Structures are given as C-alpha cells and as structure tokens.
Amino acid sequence: MAKTWLDLEKKTVIVTGGVSGIGRAIAEGFAEQGSNVVIADVNPEGEEVIKELPGGAEKHLFIKTDVTDYDNVKAMVAKTVDTYGKVDVLVNNAGINFPRLLVDPEDPEGKYELNEKEFDLMVAINQKGVFLCAQAVAREMVKEGKGVIINMSSESGLEGSEGQSCYAATKAALYSFTRSWAKELGKHGIRVVGIAPGIMEKTALRSLEYEEALAYTRGKTVEELRAGYKKVSVPLGREGKLKEVADLTCFLASDRASYIHGVTYNITGGKSRG
Ligand SMILES: NC(=O)c1ccc[n+]([C@@H]2O[C@H](COP(=O)([O-])OP(=O)(O)OC[C@H]3O[C@@H](n4cnc5c(N)ncnc54)[C@H](O)[C@@H]3O)[C@@H](O)[C@H]2O)c1
C-alpha cells in the first residue's frame, strides 16, 4: 500500500540546477514528498539550499557539478549511488538563456547579435549537459530495470521565439531526446518525459540583463515586455508558479504516471498550441 498518493518516499532524485528557480522548487517538492534529493549545480550555494529542504543536510546531498563536464557528471552520479544505492529519478533542469538576434542590422556583430561563444555555451549546458546526465544516470537505471528521466524543455522549443532562436533550438532538441530515449529506454523499464513551461514567476534566469536583451530583440521597452508576460499572451492571465511546475514534475516522476512516456507536457496557462 502506498503511504501517500504519489508514494515518492525514499526515492532518490537528482535535480540539476536545483539551487535556483524552477529547480529549487522541484527540489523542495520532492523533499516534501520524503524523497532523497541530490542537487547537482555549479553554484556552491547548494550547500545552504539542502539545509533548508525538509529533512535538511542529513537527508539530502549537494554535489557541485558542471553538467557540461563528463568527469564531473560521472563523479556526481557515482557519489549519489554510493550514498543512496541507486537513482530513481533524474530531473535535467539546468539551463541558461541569452536572448540574441540572428542579425542586428542596427549593430552588426554587436552586443545583441548571437555570437559563436554564446551559442556554444547554450548548447553545452542546455543540450550536451542533458545528454551527459541522462547517459550517466541511465547506465545505473538499466541495472535496476526502472527509473524516470525528466527533461526541462520550454514552450519556445516547439513554438520558436523571437530573439531566442538558439535557446529555443536547444529546447527543441529536448523534445527529440525525450521521444528518442523513450524508444530506447522503455524496454529497460525507464520512462522519459519532458516538461515545457511557458512564462513563469521570476527566477534567476529572468535577470534585468536578460529582460533588456529580450526587449531589445523585440523592439520593445522592458516595461512593455513585462506587461506582455501576464496579460497579452497568457489565456489564464497570469505567470505560472514555480510550484506548479514542481507539482507536475513530482506527478510525472511517480508511478501515478506509469504509462506516460516519450511526451513533453506544456505548462503554460494555455499560452501556446504545444
Ligand atoms: N523561468 C522560465 O520562465 C522558464 C521557462 C521555460 C523553461 N525554463 C527552463 O527551466 C530551467 C530552469 O530555469 P530557471 O528559470 O529556474 O533558471 P535559474 O537561472 O533560476 O536556474 C538555473 C540553475 O541552473 C544552474 N546551472 C547553470 N549552469 C549550470 C551548469 N553548467 N551545471 C550545473 N548547473 C548549472 C544555475 O546555477 C541555476 O541554479 C531551465 O532549463 C530553463 O530553460 C524556464
């Protein structure tokens, strides 16, 4: 008999990028359900974040990890298995976004034109990091014959996004990873699902620098951009709450979602076709 509806007690869950924003809300969500949470993040503040989760530092683990680095990721997964015996859930959440135009006729090769270095960094964190973490964790999950991998995509991945072409392309890649890995890993008892948030409550990702860049690429002021978050484009008339994404993540990780596989869920307040 399940103790709770989701029955996530004692599950071991790795959340990449769990120090901030959506990842932190997801870490809290699993900790509230009694799971062992491993926060894998480049930001050393993770050491403090795990102390604040229900269960604290005695139960949860922070492992400083750069998801773009093969050895880092391998060591993070090894430490998780060493500590808890297995990995039940991986949430591939770490991601970055630099809004940039493909070409800026007003300022060619300027501040807001997509350059190779930024392109490579977005692909490295948002796409390669997801591959490295999924591979390292799936190697463990196949031994157990079960597990769940959740990829944090974005509504922009399918819709495209003015001023965010590279970011959106990395997120489109996650739709494809989710579908393909579902076909490869289903036979090993591993489910793979995606989540595509739309416009959410403010996180570290939505910094002033980000808003200035995105407003520039769309020929708007930052105020006009902010007004659009809530009213213009979201049928429910508000931003999404980080906890709403965390709740969906916990559900998808649970056996209540045992036949959901290879699909990416939109969580956008009705904003897009997705
Ligand atoms: N915030 C939104 O509106 C929104 C919408 C759609 C999708 N998303 C996606 O949700 C995820 C989380 O976004 P957020 O808004 O919470 O961002 P955030 O900036 O608040 O958090 C991102 C976290 O990732 C970590 N990180 C960055 N580079 C890393 C690396 N190389 N290795 C390990 N960790 C690294 C950061 O330290 C940070 O803790 C991202 O994948 C983002 O693309 C966010």
Image (cartoon, helix red, strand yellow):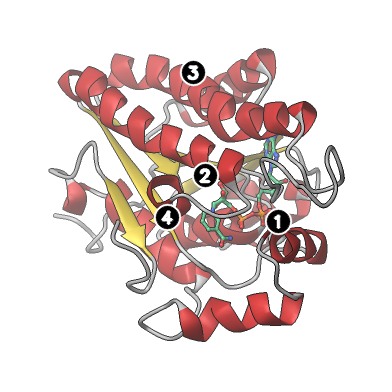
Q: Which residue is drawn at 52% across and 53% down?
A: 161
Image quadrant holding the C terminus, namely bottom left
- Between the residue at mark 4 and the residue at mark 1, the CA separation in whole angstroms equals 28 Å
- Is ligand 1 less than 8 Å from the beta carbon at label 4? yes
Q: Which of marks 4 and 1 is in front?
A: 4
Q: Which residue is drawn at 31% across and 14% down?
A: 143
What number is the disc on residue 273?
A: none
- Is ligand 1 less than 8 Å from the beta carbon at label 1? no
Of the residues shown, which amino acid type is indicated by label 3? Answer: Ala
Q: Which of marks 2 and 1 is in front?
A: 2
Quadrant position of residue 201: bottom right
Q: Mark 3 points at which residue?
A: 136
Of the residues shown, which amino acid type is indicated by label 1? Answer: Val
Helix, strand or loop at disc 4? loop
- How far across and how far down the image is residue 256, in percent? 18, 53
Marked residue nearer the N-terminal end (3 or 1): 1
Q: Is residue 42 left or right of residue 173?
A: right
Q: Residue at x 65, y 63 (%)?
A: 218
Marked residue nearer the N-terminal end (4 or 1): 1
Q: Is residue 166 above or below residue 57?
A: above
Determine if residue 244 is in view.
yes
Q: Mark 1 points at which residue?
A: 49
What number is the disc on residue 168?
A: 2
What number is the disc on residue 155?
A: 4
